[in-house]
Amino acid sequence: MLADIRFTPGSDADAVRGLLGYVQLRYGPLHLDGITLRRTMSGSLTLSWPGRRDRTGAHHALVRPISDAAREELEEAVFEELRRQEGQE
């Protein structure tokens, strides 16, 4: 289902704050953009999904996995593809 996964690295300043770069991908008939690849304080990788803040500052996801299992499946597929792409460089 996931296809055409692309990664754009962030800046060195972004990386210091844990933002490694930006991911876009095709998921079925949808093109998803604005996904960020981050390194957590504990050192693990995670994806952050696009959202917006309302006038009170509350965050509202625009797109997100429906469960932890779905999140883990998507993250592993994206991380595997990024590792594969990195090995080709």
Image: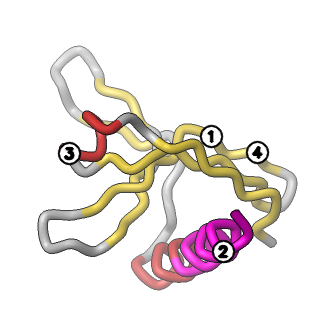
Q: Earlier in the sequence, mark 1 or mark 2?
A: 1
Closer to the camera, 68 or 73?
73
Q: Earlier in the sequence, mark 3 or mark 4?
A: 3
Closer to the camera, 65 or 39?
39
Location of mark 1 (residue): 33
Q: Amino acid at mark 2?
A: Gly
Give the alpha-carbon distance from disc 3 to disc 4, as whole Å: 29 Å
Residue 54 part of the magenta-drawn span: no
Q: Amino acid at mark 3?
A: Val
Give the secondary structure at mark 4. strand
* Position of 80 relative to 49 (above/below): below
Categorize mark 2 by other alpha carbons within 10 Å: few (<14), some (14-19), many (20+). few
The numbered disc on residue 31 is: 4
Closer to the camera, 61 or 37?
37
Q: Are marks 4 and 1 in contact (CB under 8 Å)?
A: yes
Give the alpha-carbon distance from disc 2 to disc 3, as whole Å: 23 Å
Q: Is residue 65 left or right of residue 7?
A: left
